[in-house]
Amino acid sequence: MSPDRQNPVAQQLETRRFARRLALVYGAVFGLGGISLPYFPVWLKAVGVDVGWIGLITAVPALTRFTVLPFITGFAERRNRLREGIVVLALLTSLGFLAIGQLRDPLHILAVFALTACVWTPIIPMVDGYALKGVTRYGIDYGPVRLWGSAAFIVGSLACGLMIDFVTASFVIWVIAAMALIEAVTSFGLRPLAGDGPAAGEAPRAGALLRQAGFLAIIFTSALVQGSHAVYYAFASIAWQNAGHSGLTVSALWSIGVVAEIIVFAVSPRFSWSPLAMVAFAAAVAALRWIITAQQPALPLLALVQTLHGLSFGLTQVGIVGLFTRNVPSQVMASAQGYLVAATGLVMSSATMGAGVLYARYGEGAYYAMAAMALGGSALIVLARKWLVTTDAADS
């Protein structure tokens, strides 16, 4: 029964059930990321894979994000099988990591990890697409649900970091595989969103989005702002260690950023700005953040600047979600998320390669290029406002 035909109490219970189950999936998805991102390379090193191969293997997910990913998300959505697609991909991901754990030859690991990445990387945009359909269908707020993903990322990373002091690093792959299995189990709890759109022959085509200037502005604004974090992701820890900060201090600085992100997600339902204003402001804050970081500030100011991650990343995400719900038909939401991740992956991978060159030559001065990217994103979304719907009134 559709939620709008239920009595108010039943509708409220259904909405809460949907939000709780989605929060569990977000927790599992990002918990896996919190373990695999920092510790999969550690496992590779522990089983004897040399640095050159590690770089090649860990680069694979970035490649699949703008090649295979959009086709898989589009395939699942065209067949109105988004929930089932998430379940199948999560199961295949867990099997992939279990298979990788049996391997030691770098070429074999690369081959199996490449196949695993093809089914793993589409999960986040598919979950986001499913979530945004639920935002529209049930009227829930995105931020308070999404924050559980960020919280799980921290918990997963810290827990695995503590565990690795007591077990051999070669055991990490089984923790990753176990978390992938938890992801698959939680995905079974997702509520079907049957009847979300028209029959298959009447559904809007996702490819048409790529001919809309407003949609292209949204995804490339997001790609520019999120891509402006490239130097931060790749070299912040190195720079902080070079500045004499301890490992604990470095971890604390990273944690400050993620906690600020969680706070922004938690309070986002209270924001009254239009999503376009949120994104433009967040992009400007990102530029300010990178300009200050380039000055190599003292630790107290650096810790304060880290709180801006809640805006440069978190508020950008909230604003982009708002623009998506107002400008993208619900029936192609997952495909739109696939295009967004593909654009971000392309820009982020290019920015990361450029960041390496810039950091090698200019050190912290590389952050000025990141500030220019963020300002470019702010300018792009402001210039695109004539093509965009930014108010809830358009949804009715």
Image (cartoon, rainbow, N blue to C red):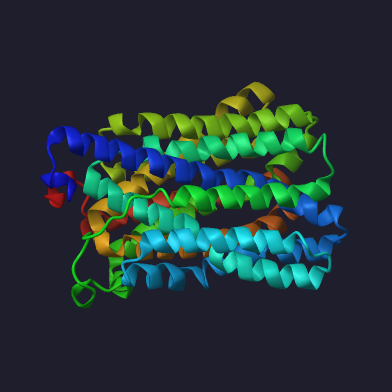
Task: Using the image as rendered, state which of residue 26 and residue 389 is in the foreground.
Answer: 26
Residue 366 visible? The answer is no
Task: Using the image as rendered, state which of residue 342 and residue 170 is in the foreground.
Answer: 170
Q: Residue at x 66, y 28 (%)?
A: 252
Badge count: 0
* Residue 40 as seen in the image, left or right of residue 23: right
Q: Residue at x 42, y 32 (%)?
A: 264
* Residue 380 as seen in the image, left or right of residue 259: left
Q: Quadrant of residue 335 in the image?
A: bottom left
**Residue 292, image x, y percentages:** 58, 35
**Residue 218, image x, y percentages:** 35, 57
**Residue 174, image x, y percentages:** 72, 50
Residue 359 visible? The answer is yes
Residue farthest toward the bottom in the current orientation of the protein: 201
Q: Residue at x 54, y 66 (%)?
A: 119
* Residue 76 as seen in the image, left or right of residue 57: left
Q: Vertically, is 373 above or below 200?
A: above
Task: Using the image as rendered, state which of residue 140 and residue 237 is in the foreground.
Answer: 140
Task: Using the image as rendered, state which of residue 191 and residue 170 is in the foreground.
Answer: 191
Q: Quadrant of residue 8 in the image?
A: top left
**Residue 158, image x, y percentages:** 67, 34
Q: Vertically, is 208 above or below 6?
A: below
Q: Vertically, is 130 above or below 278?
A: below
Q: Quadrant of residue 140 in the image?
A: top left
Q: Residue at x 27, y 74 (%)?
A: 205
